[in-house]
Image: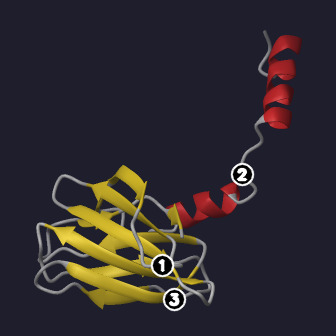
Amino acid sequence: MTGDGDDTDREILARIARDDPPPPDLDERVLFALALTDLEAEVARLAEATPALARAGEQAHTVTFDAASRTVMITVVERADNLVRVDGWLAPAAALVVELRLPEPAEPRVVTADDTGRFVFDEVPHGLAQLLIHPPSTGTPKVVTPSLQL
């Protein structure tokens, strides 16, 4: 077999490309994920994603991320104006800086969680996003979530 594969390999790859093509925004997602300048971060993993109860007429879903040092749970609520509200909680609870990264040219949004670990980002556009939880002291890595589609 050569470096290009044989006819069977090419047929399989062509069938995959036809029947299961990559998402159209795959390149944007990869570039967004690679754009982190601070590689000293603890990567959280997706633990759970479920529909959430919401008030009449609202759609919401809850996503939980786990890292060794912290758990981040967010509820994304659809607003009537085609934006979303992101309500979040940190465990263990702490008044930490939480950054919501959005693709360029949007600037990141930054809030500080309260003493119970609660934080809110309102009027957020749909699209890719990623959370960075800044540590309480230097020498401790940030916690970063995988990118998610809001």
Q: Nearer the viewer, residue 92 or 28?
A: 92
Is 46 rendered above or below residue 118? above
Q: Determine the CA span between mark 3 and mark 1.
A: 32 Å
> The disc labelled 2 sits on which kind of residue?
Pro
Query: Of discs 1 and 2, which sits in the foreground?
Result: 1
Q: Is residue 75 left or right of residue 115?
A: right
Q: Residue at x 77, y 42 (%)?
A: 21
The residue beneath circle 3 is 107
Q: Secondary structure at mark 2?
A: loop
Q: Are marks 2 and 3 in contact (CB under 8 Å)?
A: no
Q: Is residue 67 left or right of residue 86?
A: left
- Rendering coords of residue 23 (x, y %): 71, 51
- Rendering coords of residue 73 (x, y %): 29, 65
Q: Secondary structure at mark 3?
A: loop
Q: Are marks 1 and 2 in contact (CB under 8 Å)?
A: no
Which badge, 1 or 2, comes first in the chain's sequence?
2
Asked whether residue 37 is in view, the answer is no
Quadrant occupied by the C terminus: bottom right
Query: Of discs 2 and 3, which sits in the foreground?
Result: 2
Which class describes the residues within 10 Å of circle 1: few (<14), some (14-19), or many (20+)? Answer: few
> The disc labelled 3 sits on which kind of residue?
Glu
Which badge, 2 or 3, comes first in the chain's sequence?
2
Rendered image coloring scheme: secondary structure
The residue beneath circle 1 is 56
Residue 23 tag number: 2
Q: Determine the CA span between mark 2 and mark 3.
A: 25 Å
Q: Nearer the viewer, residue 4 or 73?
A: 73
Quadrant occupied by the N terminus: top right
> The disc labelled 1 sits on which kind of residue?
Ala
